[in-house]
Image (cartoon, helix red, strand yellow):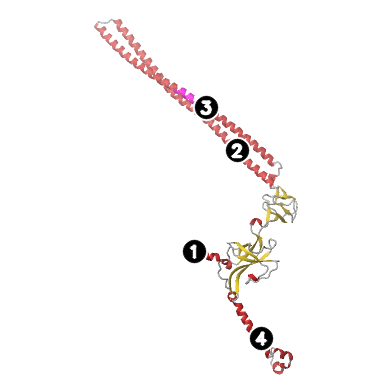
Amino acid sequence: MLNITHNKLNEKVDLSEYTAIQKVFHKRHYKYFNRFLKTFAVIAMVVMFVPWTQNISGNGFLTTLKPDQRPQTIQSPIPGRIEKWYVKEGDFVKEGDTILFISEIKNEYFDPNLVERTGQQIKAKSMSVSSYEGKVKALESQLFAITNERDLKLQQARNKLLQSKLKVQSDSIDFEAAKTSIRIAERQYNRTVQLEKEGLKALTDVEEKRLKLQETQAKLISQENKLLASKNEVINSKVEINRVRAEYTDKISKSQSDKYTAQSNQFDAQAQVTKLENQYTNYEMRTNLHYIRAPQSGFINRALRSGVGETFKEGDRLVNIMPSAYDLAVETYVKPIDLPLIHIGEKVRIQFDGWPAIIFSGWPNASYGTYGGEIVAIETFISDNGKYRVLIAPDPADHEWPKIQVGSGANTLALLEDVPIWFELWRQLNGFPPNYYQPYGQKTEKSKKK
C-alpha cells in the first residue's frame, strides 16, 4: 500500500496470516536472492572484460561498382516528336536495338531530301573550285608570258641604248676631228692671207682657203648636230626602258591581281565546300539520331515520355534502362566524426534489407546472415545529407552476396579495434568517438619509415 492517508493499513492489518505473504517473505528466499545477486555480479564483472569490437554503423543501399553499370536514362540530343515505340516496359534490349523513332520539329530540317540536296550543293561548289583552279593556272601562264615579253622588250631597249651610246662615242670622235679640221683650216687661211699681203699668194688662193674654212665650219656644226642627236637617242633609249618597265609592271600587276582574286575565290569556294561537307555530315548524323537506340544491353524500366506525337526538347529524358550485367556494391554514408577511422581496403559487414540476419555488432564472428565487404572508395566531399559517401565492394574472401536488386537497402558495420566491454560502455556514456584506428599495414609502414 502507498500509505498516503493517516489511517495506515499495515498497522491495523496483520499480513503475516495470509498464505501468499508467508510464501513471499520467508527467510529462505533471501538466501537464494543473495546468491543470485552475487552470481550476477560475478558474471557481470567477467563480461565487462570480454572483448568488444568497436564498429561504425551506416545506412545505405545497393548500387553498382562501375558507373556505366548503374541505371541510366536515355536522352535525345535533338528535339523531336515521338512517332513510334518499338519496346514496352520490362523488355530486354541488346546494345544498338531501336527503342523508338522520332521526327523533326524544326522547320530547317523538314525537307526529307535535305542530305541529297546538300550533296548536290557540294558537287556544284566542287566544280566551282575546279573552275577557279583552271583560271588560276591560265593567269599563271599569262603572267609567265608577260614576264618573258617584258624581259625581251627590256633586252631590246638595252641593246638600243648600247647602240646609242656607241653612236654617241662615234659622233664625239667625228666632232673632235671636225674641231681639229677647223683649226687647221683657220691656220691655213690666216697663213694664206698673210702671204697674199706680202704678195706671195694670189687672191684666188685666199678665196680657196676661205671657202675651205667655211666648209670645215659647216662640217663642225653638222657633226655637233649629229652628236646631240646621238645623245638624244641615248636619252630616248633610257626613256624607252623605263616605259617598257612601267608598261609591263602594270600588265604584270593586273595579271597578278586577277590571279590573287581567282585564288581568293577558289579558297572561298573551298571553304564553302568544307562548310557544306560539315553540314552534310551533321545532317547525315542527325538523320541517324531519329532512331533512339539502346546504349547497352539491359531492361527497359520505365518510359518517361509516353504516347505518340508528344514533343520534347533536346536533353529531355525519354526512357530509363537498367544494364543486365553489373557488379554489385553498397553505397553507405558515415558521419564526419567517423571519417578518419575509415580507410580504403578495410573489411565491412553488411546486412541486406529483406534478408534474414542475426547481428551482434560487438561480436561480428557470432553474427549470422551478414556478408563481407571491402571499402574501395571514400568520397572527399561531404554529401547533401551531411555525411560522407563510402563505396563498398564484395569481399572475395567471404561468401558470395545474395541475388538482390539494385536499390535495396543495406546496413553496414565497419569493424575497428577490440576493446573491453567496460571501456565501450564508458565511451558510449561519455559520447566519445571510437579509438583512432589505422590498418595494420599502415602502422607497419610508418614504423619502417621511422
Whether tag 1 and tag 2 are in contact, CB under 8 A, the answer is no
Q: Give the range drawn in magenta.
A: 142-158
- State the image coordinates of residue 282 (x, y, percent, origin top left): 65, 44
In the image, which disc is placed on residue 449? Answer: 1
**Mark number displayed over residue 223:** none
Q: Which of 46 and 307 is in front in this view?
A: 46
First-in-chain label (1 vs 2): 2
Q: Is residue 225 placed above or below 205 in the rendered structure?
A: below
On screen, 292 above or below 245? below
Identify the secondary structure beneath mark 1. helix
In the rendered image, which residue does mark 3 sit on?
146
Q: Which residue type carries mark 2?
A: Gln
Query: Which residue is drawn at the image coordinates 67% and 39% (left, top)?
Result: 119
Up the image or down, 181 lies above or below 148; here it is above
Q: Which amino acid does label 3 sit on?
A: Ile
- Residue placed at 49% from the left, 26% from the top? 150
Q: List the residue tagged with mark 2.
A: 270
